[in-house]
Every structure is written in structure tokens, then in C-alpha cells.
Image (spheres, rainbow, N blue to C red):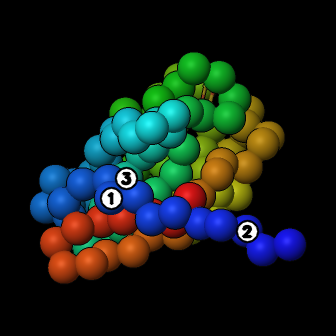
Amino acid sequence: MSETRTRIRLCATRDVDWNGALKVETGDLTLAVFNVEGAFYVTDDACTHGPGSLSEGYLDGHVIECDFHNGAFDLRTGAVVAPPCMIPLRTYKVIVEGDDLLIEA
Ligand code: FES
């Protein structure tokens, strides 16, 4: 069975600070958009460990550290890189089209 994917525009690329993050709500998704040296990554905003909002976390290269209990994830894969997080973070395929930043979901 094939899976239907929808492209969703999240923001303009210039809306996301260099080496920063932006929280975007669209439909029933709350996402964190990251700009790492001009490369964009999108994940769920909610930390898999608790109430932390990852767009408010500490970005260090491709690692986002949750400001609640300092768990951390690799933005490229969603893999956990520091406890107490145990569940990987959902990531989304990012598409840059002109000045627009989209995901496939
Ligand atoms: Fe993010 Fe606990 S809520 S590490």
C-alpha cells in the first residue's frame, strides 16, 4: 500500500534565525524548525521526555538540548544523544523552495 504525503509550507527561510529555532504550529502539528549554519531541520517541538519545547532549547551544532532536564537529540536523525530522553524525536523531510520552507508529512 502506498503512503500519501502532503507538502506543508511552514515559514520563510529568513524567519528562522541563523543557528536558531522557530516554533511553528500547522494543523495538528507543533514543530520546531532549526537553522544550523544555513541547513534546515524540522522536528516535533515537544520533547519526547516531558513538557519541554525544543524550539526553546539550547542548539549546539546538530544537537538540540531540552531546557527542561537537559536531554538531547540529534536533529538529523532524531536519535537520543543524552538522557533522560529515551524515545527518539520525530523528524520531517525538509524542502526549500525559493524562500519557502516546507515539509512532507
Ligand atoms: Fe525534555 Fe525532560 S522534558 S529532557
* Residue 37 on image: x %, y %: 28, 72
* Residue 64 on image: x %, y %: 49, 49
Q: Residue at x 64, y 51 (%)?
A: 90
> What is the quadrant of residue 70 in the picture?
top right
Q: Is residue 2 visible?
A: yes
Q: Which residue is mark 1?
A: 9
Q: Which label was assigned to residue 33?
A: 3
Q: Which label was assigned to residue 37?
A: none
Query: Regarding mark 3 in the picture, which secondary structure is present there?
Result: strand
Dividing the image into four equal quarters, which quarter contains ligand 1? top right
Taking depth in this image into account, of 42 and 3 the one nearest to the observer is 3
- Alpha carbons under labels 3 and 1: distance apart: 12 Å
Amino acid at the residue labelled 1: Arg
Q: Which residue is mark 2?
A: 3
Q: Residue at x 79, y 40 (%)?
A: 86
Amino acid at the residue labelled 3: Val
Taking depth in this image into account, of 85 and 102 the one nearest to the observer is 102
* Residue 71 on image: x %, y %: 63, 37
Q: Residue at x 73, y 68 (%)?
A: 3
- Alpha carbons under labels 2 and 1: distance apart: 19 Å
* First in residue order: circle 2 vs circle 3: 2
- Alpha carbons under labels 2 and 3: distance apart: 24 Å
Query: Regarding mark 1 in the picture, which secondary structure is present there?
Result: strand
